[in-house]
Amino acid sequence: MFARREIGTALALAGIAGLSCLVRLPGFREGGFASHDVGGILYEAMLLRAGGLPYVDAIELKAPGTFYLATVLAGPDGRDIAAFQIAANLVALASLLVLAVLAWRLWGARAAVVAAALYALHDAHLDSMDANYVTWAQLPAIAAGLCAARAAAWREEPVSSRRSFGTWLLGGVMCGLAALCKQPSGVVLLPVLFWAVCPPGRRDLRAGLAVLAGFLLAHLPVGLHYLARGHLGALLGGYVWNPWGFEYIARNTAATAPARAAWELLAAAVHFLALPLALALLALTARPRGHAAKDMSQGTPSHVSKDSREVPGATRFLLAWTAAAVAAAATGLRFYKGYWLGVLPPLCLLAAAPWGVCAAAPWRRGWPRLVLAPLILALTVRAAWAVRLTRDDRARPHDEGARAIGRWLGDRTGPDDTIWVWGWHLWGVHAYSGRLSASRVYKTLGLLTTTPDDTWRTPAGPPQMLADGPWAQQLLRDLAAAPPAFVAIGGTAPKHEFPALRRFLAAHYVRDYGLRFGKVEIWRRADR
């Protein structure tokens, strides 16, 4: 009987993973930049392969983990977006399977299927099947939860204290890897640390120290790389305490009233996570009062599955994880869709608890069932439809301009030539052309122009030039010191607000009309 249940659960999980793979199929085949942010990831990978360093040879805000991953996973030159996309989708599928293992560890076999199915209904839509920062951070974040669950269970066995300590250490490493891929995802450290230090009824400082040691250990290879190059301060200033990033957060926070921010937070959470949020709330409502894992052996409540189990402190951990992930999603008060992917795992796990979706809970009887069943069905259909639209959208190229311009410039330049592009939608030009930027200012958002003021539901206003700012002066110095072979300026860039750049181009460059794409301007150095 036990073997049949285990085999059935494994087959069900394989089916869910297979369906998720079909949803993500365009991401395995399309191979373009669905998010221009990934163009920045591959640029930094190209820079690393050329012997440069992010934060030193390029002004950068993002965490460095994905840059190092791209040097390995994005082809021999660190710029193959198709290979990087395939790796990202495999990592996303691995995240689904690790979540299922975690649910199995916490609640049992049936919960693993429920959590995996609920996660598969949302993850491809929330990360749009791309290779963005959150995709890579999700796997170590969920793995950190799995390590914490195993360590918490082993802690109850005196003979396994050394194994528990090592697993807490590994959980800290996973937290560190999540932060290295995306800084806000590193907040998973807080719930893991909480579970380590504060198990039910006691304190365990040794486990907490193991988690912190693992978190620091994950950063050791990157730190040693920068230290060996004499630029450890640049890593600390760019990744740990980036003034550009903190200014961005402070500016957006100051511009939004607290009541407005709270409303946007609630509205965005309901919009993106309506189904798992509703099921998690219902599961918490149905949870037996005073329930603890030790009570399960003395008798199981009538509405809880007979094969269920609970690791001590699991529900508290999931609630802390949810709170930390929501706080991370609120960073900058923009509430973008991808930010909510980090909130999805703990909600799916809460919904799959023995007293949740799997159980004949009180809210599934009588009149509550008549009200809630149609609502849950409607939310399920809505989530499935969103995944379908995402799949169709991902099957279409979103970077035709970057592809055409990048290949055109690549054919007309040599490996030692540099270029400079202005425009968020042109970041992928570097990967397609194989050419590095002539300036450390290869990204312009927040440097040459104000940060876009769009949110999860409102479009951005027109970009404005930062008049004579330090980064504009830095750009002009870089271009004058080593003029690039070509300059490409996107149609939406506020080029007329930067007269000094226009004068520089007029003096040293000529317009090249060999390639016309929309309103993009291509300038060729006059001596070529």
Image (spheres, rainbow, N blue to C red):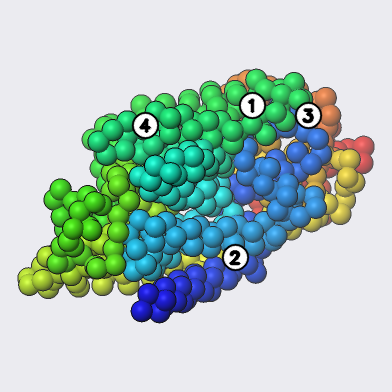
Residues at circles 3 and 2 in contact by the CB criterion of under 8 Å: no
Kindly report the distance in space between the C-alpha atoms of the residues bearing marks 4 and 2. 44 Å
- Please give the count of numbered marks on the rendered protein: 4
- Please give left or right for residue 262 compared with residue 429 in the image: left
Q: How far apart are marks 1 and 3 (CA)?
A: 25 Å
Q: Distance between the residues labelled 3 and 2?
A: 37 Å
Q: Which of marks 4 and 2 is nearer the N terminus?
A: 2
Tag 4 residue: 204
**Mark toward the viewer: 4 or 1:** 4
**Mark 3 vs 2, N-terminal side:** 2
User: Residue 500, how many percent across, how many down?
Assistant: 70, 26
Circles 4, 1 touching at the beta carbon (< 8 Å): no
Amino acid on which disc 4 is placed: Asp
Q: How many residues crowd mark 4 within 10 Å: few (<14), some (14–19), many (20+)?
A: some
Q: Do the residues labelled 4 and 2 touch (CB within 8 Å)?
A: no
Q: Mark 1 points at which residue?
A: 235
Mark 2 vs mark 1: which is more N-terminal?
A: 2
Q: Quick one: 222 or 161, which is closer to the camera?
A: 161
- Amino acid type assigned to the residue bearing label 1 in the image: Leu
Q: Distance between the residues labelled 2 and 1?
A: 32 Å
**Residue 27 got which mark?**
2
User: Residue 154 versus residue 47: which sits nearer the camera?
Assistant: 154
Query: Where residue 240 sits: x, y (%)?
Result: 55, 27
Of labels 3 and 2, the one closer to you? 2
Q: Specify the label residue 479 is tagged with.
A: 3
Upstream in sequence: badge 1 or badge 3: 1
Task: Name the amino acid type tagged 2.
Answer: Gly
